[in-house]
Amino acid sequence: MNAKQLLEKVQFVVDAEGNKSAVQLSVEVWSELLTILEDLEDAEEIRLARENKEAAIPWEKGKAELGIEV
């Protein structure tokens, strides 16, 4: 599911006058949105590294070197 489809699942909380005052998301939708945002951030970092001619390191190798467990 893409971000637009996920955001269509938002439920609005309204005040006494009927004005939208907050949003409510399920945990599943929130988790999927975070994944999309993190992927976009990773893609930007990769793009910048390529522009700067930095050496590319496979993500799995980088995680291992940093001691990150997923």
Image (cartoon, rainbow, N blue to C red):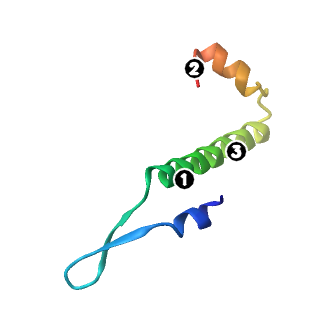
State the separation of the CA atoms marked 3 and 2. 19 Å
Q: Which residue is mark 2?
A: 68
Residue 23, given in percent of the width and then of the height, sits at 37, 66
Q: Which residue is mark 3?
A: 43
Which residue type carries mark 3?
Ala
Which residue type carries mark 1?
Leu
Q: Nearer the viewer, mark 1 or mark 2?
A: 1
In the picture, which quadrant includes the N terminus?
Answer: bottom right
Between 35 and 48, which is closer to the camera in this rendering? 35
What residue is drawn where x is 50% and y is 50%?
28
| Among the 4 quarters of the image, the one containing residue 16 | bottom left
Q: Which residue is mark 1?
A: 33
Residue 53, given in percent of the width and then of the height, sits at 80, 34
Residue 11 lies, with reference to residue 35, above or below; the image says below
State the separation of the CA atoms marked 1 and 2. 22 Å
What residue is drawn where x is 71% and y is 42%?
48
Residue 5, given in percent of the width and then of the height, sits at 61, 66
Q: Secondary structure at mark 3?
A: helix
Residue 41 lies, with reference to residue 54, above or below; the image says below
Between 35 and 66, which is closer to the camera in this rendering? 35
State the separation of the CA atoms marked 1 and 3. 15 Å
In the rendered structure, are the residues bearing label 1 and label 2 in contact, judged by CB atoms less than 8 Å apart? no
Residue 34 lies, with reference to residue 2, above or below; the image says above
> Which badge, 1 or 3, comes first in the chain's sequence?
1
User: Mark 3: few, some, or many residues within 10 Å (few <14, many ≥20)?
Assistant: few
